[in-house]
Image (cartoon, grey):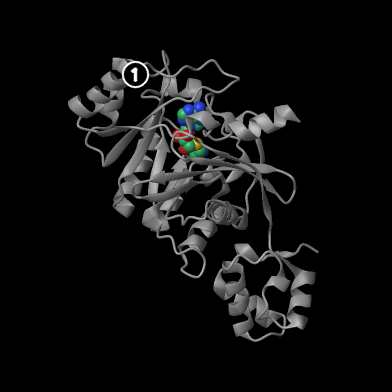
Amino acid sequence: MEKTDLLSLFPEELEQFAVSHGEKAFRGRQLAQGLANGARCFRDITTLPARFVETLEQTAEIRGMETERKLVSKLDGTVKFLFALQDGEAVESVFMRYRHGNTVCISTQVGCRMGCAFCASTKAGLVRSLEPSEMLLQVRRAEEETGETVSNIVLMGMGEPLDNYDNVLRFLRLVNRKEVLGIGMRHISLSTCGLVERMDRLAKEDLQLTLSVSLHAPTDEKRREIMPIARKYSLRELLAACDRYTAATGRRISYEYALIAGVNDTPEDAHALGKLLRGRLAHLNLIPVNPIREKAFRRSEQQAIQTFAQITEGTYRVSTTVRRRLGGDIDASCGQLRANRETRE
Ligand code: SAH
């Protein structure tokens, strides 16, 4: 029998769990408290009676996750983690210090099936989706390992969050609960390569999170060359979904654009992109591409980046920032540590 994964449950579900095993509801609250305090086994929760501990050991589990590697950047204190999951798979998370608070970038899947040409996480395809507990543990472990509190979460690590929709939504609602982490939706960003139907579904959830959309090219032709998802949804369909999302939630969308030398970084590209985003409730985040070992993508020259940003912001009035690079000395871009782990083995 599969054991119930308690870290994926809401506090009221833990109460129900207690009641359904013949205990009073307050035992469920004690259990929730124990889990929130970081208990790694039921015996750690000393408020629980021995008979309930025994039942729990037979029917339920507190998922574990071990820190397999921890790399601290000498440049900016960014910490990169490789966490081993219970089944031996591994995911990456990154802890970053910003002025607005500590941020953890978490993974939502082991691997990814979206196949973007420049991305290290997707090279070996999708292994499996993560459980809500496994996303929660990435935040918890980052806090434990650094001794600092996390105030922001970004779902921009390995995986496509909207390809693991139900578990991701449960995770978001879990961390939102004050009994669990108490991190508000406005402190959470979710990045997608543009799964249109799922974006529409997300819009209906009425969450105040920030949606990031990975654009990476200003025309369908160019986008199809680097992102397979562009063969399924055209830019027109994608941007229409973005507009529906903004209309439903009132939230500005953040568009991600990885600048790749000679691929999508010319002034013409900037003009085409400016025309696409002009007049929309949009923020443009330009990311100098992180070259990955297997592909010959090069980062754009500093001058090309500046010119690009001047066009989108100056000519088209699209709010534009160039992403500051954190953890450049520790392979901090997602997917690279896990990929190296596979080649080492
Ligand atoms: N699957 C989601 C979230 C994961 S990746 C998505 O596609 O949005 C988070 C961001 O990093 C995405 O914008 C992704 O396109 C980008 N990215 C992936 N590989 C990169 C690389 N080598 N250099 C720069 N950005 C990269």
Indicate the amino acid at tag 1: Gln
As drawn, 49 above or below 268: below
Residue 187 visible: yes
Residue lying at 58% horizontally and 78% vertically, measured from the top left: 29
Q: Residues within 10 Å of mark 1 (few under 14, many from 20)?
A: few
Q: Could you tell me which residue is drawn at 77 percent across and 82 percent down? A: 51
Q: In this figure, which residue is indicated by the disc labeled 1?
A: 302
Residue 201 is left or right of residue 23, and the answer is left
In the displayed structure, does residue 337 sit left or right of residue 302?
A: right
List x then y, in percent, for residue 220: 41, 24
Q: Is residue 293 left or right of residue 215?
A: right
Q: Position of residue 206 (x, y in %)?
A: 38, 58
Residue 230 visible in the displayed image: no
Q: How many marks?
A: 1
Q: Residue furthest top?
A: 262
Q: In the image, residue 104 lies at what x, y percent? A: 48, 48
* Residue found at x 69% / y 85%: 23
Q: Is residue 9 above or below residue 329?
A: below
Which quadrant holds the N terminus?
bottom right
Quadrant of residue 49 in the image? bottom right
Q: Residue at x 35, y 48 (%)?
A: 245
SS for callout 1: helix
Is 50 left, or right, of 319 in this rendering?
right
How far from the left and from the top, in percent, is residue 62?
69, 63
Q: Nearer the viewer, residue 238 or 76?
A: 76
* Residue 217 position (above or below residue 144): above
Pick whichever, 318 or 201, lies toward us. 318
Locate residue 317: give its quadrant: top left
> Which quadrant would the C terminus be assigned to in this image?
top right
Relative height, residue 81 to residue 257 (above, below) = below
Q: Does ligand 1 reach within 8 Å of label 1's beta carbon? A: no
